[in-house]
Amino acid sequence: MNKVTIYGLTFEQLTAWLEERGHRKFRASQVWEALYVKRITDFAEMTEVNPECIQLLADHFVIQTLTEHVKQESKDGTVKFLFRLQDGNLIETVLMRHKFGLSVCVTTQVGCNIGCSFCASGLLKKSRDLSGGEVVEQIMKVQLYLDAAGQGERVSHIVVMGIGEPFDNFTNMVNFIQVVKDQKGLAIAARHITVSTSGLADKIKEFADTDLRVNLAISLHAPNNEIRSRIMKINRAIPIEQLMEAIDYYLERTNRRITLEYIMLKDINDQREHALELAELIGERRSLANVNLIPYNPVDEHSQYQRPERETIRAFYDTLKKQNVSVSVRLEHGTDIDAACGQLRSKQIKKDQDPVTVG
């Protein structure tokens, strides 16, 4: 059986694991520093850790389990990685360059069962959850890529918005956050971490109770149940009223701003009446909610959807502004590569499955 990556242990879990096997707490600190500060990828290179502890770790864990399968680099500096897992499955991770720092979008599941009809991630159904360690390792792979470039750059922001529904892999997602925000290691500030959900109401409430103090984004994408149920299968089980009740719980419990993600689909959810209905839905939550408008990235398999014209997006934006709704338009990255989430993975799997014709 494959050994699991040690990246899956929080500092507290690593400390307890070593203490149960007769090692003192400072050993955990040495190992943690080697992993996340020195970014050592071979137990044998942990020279400050005694040989007995190194052997114990090597007997039970590995450090790296992901291998780079494809890498696409955009002219805007965006880098999309397609990683192969130990079991052969493929996942996507994306590095994006912003004025405020370097952000990495991570994947939490192999495939997705949420069934959003516009999304490339859902083209291939979920086969399994990623472990917390496999999610952490995506950050480490990107950081090692940056280290190799020799420019002294570091990952400063994380968005949990890649393939899969993070709240459908809740425990591993929470463990991942605890690892990457640990001040003795990667030390990524909680305010620089954003988790996105399609709207699992019960998990939104549970997330509010974790006190992780990271940011929450809700994939809303429609102002009413009729449109949302048409484009997002999850709305049939968890309608907007139930979702908004969970959002209210989150806002009351945390007093933290949320982002309402709104993908703009031509002639479906992009008209002035939709903007007015969205403003009414947000209502008194205006002070703690920001709408992020996302121009649709076309996907071959979802040819029924198109991106609205720039003027339509501007009119929608202006309508929300006039209703005193905080609103922004997402800056696009990697438009010259497979920009849509899940698109590179889907294309690669199809390519691998196509029969080879010998001329």
Image (cartoon, rainbow, N blue to C red):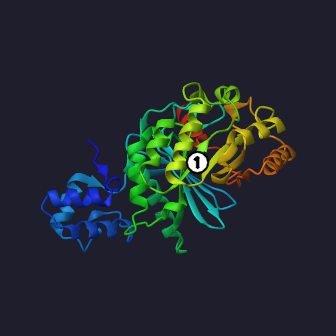
**Secondary-structure class at tag 1:** strand
* Residue farthest along the right direction in this orientation: 311
Camera-side residue of 72 and 317? 317
Camera-side residue of 247 and 54? 247
Label 1 Cα neighbours within 10 Å, binned few <14 / some 14-19 / many ≥20: many
* Residue 260 horizontal side relative to residue 5, left or right: right
Q: Is residue 40 visible?
A: yes
Q: Which residue is label 1 attached to? A: 217
Residue 248 percent across, percent down from the top left: 56, 43
Q: Quadrant of the C terminus?
A: top right
| In the image, residue 212 above or below residue 47 | above
| In the image, residue 136 above or below residue 245 | below
* Residue 311 horizontal side relative to residue 11, left or right: right
What residue is rendered at 52% in x and 46% in y?
A: 250
Query: Type of residue at label 1?
Result: Ala
| In the image, residue 2 above or below residue 230 | below
* Residue 290 horizontal side relative to residue 141, left or right: right
Residue 91 percent across, percent down from the top left: 50, 44
Camera-side residue of 57 and 8? 8
Q: Is residue 359 visible?
A: no
What residue is rendered at 65% in x and 64% in y?
A: 98
Residue 253 percent across, percent down from the top left: 49, 50
Q: Quadrant of the N terminus?
A: top left
Quarter occupied by residue 18: bottom left
Residue 47 percent across, percent down from the top left: 25, 73
Quarter occupied by residue 48: bottom left
* Residue 270 horizontal side relative to residue 351, left or right: right
